[in-house]
Image (cartoon, helix red, strand yellow):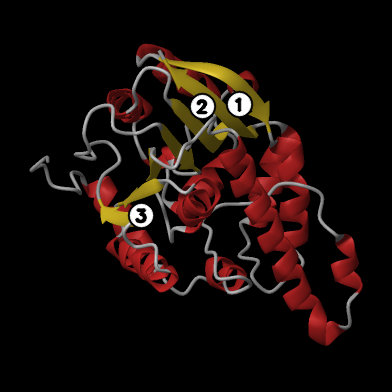
Amino acid sequence: MTDTPVLRTAFQQAVADYWNTNQDDPVNLRLGEVDDIYHHHYGIGEPDLSVLEKPEDQRDQAVIEELHRLETAQANCLLDNLGDIKPSDSLLDAGSGRGGTSIMAHNRFGCTVDGATISEYQVGFANEQAEKRGIADEVKFHFKNMLDTGFATGSRQAIWTNETTMYVDLFDLYREFSRLLPVGGRYVCITGCSNDLTGGRSKSVSKIDEHYNCNIHPRSQYFKALAENNLVPINVIDLTAATIPYWELRQKCSVATGIEDPFLTSYKEGSFQYLMIVADRV
């Protein structure tokens, strides 16, 4: 195991502080309360807009339940692309948040899952979720830096990042993932990235960076970093059109934060894209 401190830089400390103190964010908590699966990402798919026609005293909760369904659909889309996962395999959720996707992966595949996050609050929350379900021996969350996990070389059959790569250097990240994956191992990334074709970073993308204290990468940077680290994309899916309805619905409920407008503006003007990249270790 590495003796390197988990938080190496002032930026990493700032990111950890953000998530450690952002504990009561209703966007995550109220949606997670729907079925006790807590996500830290966004949704895809066509929403059931009949929820907007509910009586006023029921409408907000109906919208929240629909948003949660779309976020769960996003997580299932990611899991669908992990390949042939056996119960004997070990997976890594890099930037695991409150643990929802890790729990879903174990429930689907029966395998062991480790989650890594630099938020100690998230580690505690997610481990409580695993303990409550009686799966704490199979699903474990760790206060670890995804750039240097300390896990054994070749120990992960699959790794995913779900909207977490904008917090790290991609070349450092994929160097670590290439170490952790055996030849034939699978990496799946869902991320927002700026569109190189539109030129410099748009005002809307900059607002997203500022809101989440992150550093959104240009699309080209992903493919350069993957290629340098023996990770070969086998599928790239543009999910931008599939996520816009989620953001339009989120504008219409009590958990809206104001960041919905920059997301919708940047998606619709083409300066921001929501991609899923599926890559194999070669």
Front: mark 2 or 3:
3
SS assignment at label 3: loop
Please tell me whether residue 40 is drawn above or below residue 92 in the rendered image: below
State left or right for residue 136 relative to residue 60. left
The numbered disc on residue 218 is: 2
Q: Is residue 203 visible in this depiction of the protein?
A: no
Residue 214 x/y as whole percent = 42, 45
The residue pinned by badge 3 equals 138
State left or right for residue 82 relative to residue 263. left
Q: Is residue 66 visible in this depiction of the protein?
A: yes
Residue drawn at x 51%, y 52% as measured from the top left = 101
Which quadrant of the figure contains the N terminus?
top left
Residue drawn at x 13%, y 47% as measured from the top left = 5
Residue 102 x/y as whole percent = 45, 52
Which of the two residues, 256 or 229, is positioned nearer the viewer here? 229
Whole-angstrom CA distance, mark 2 to mark 1, is 6 Å
The residue pinned by badge 1 equals 195
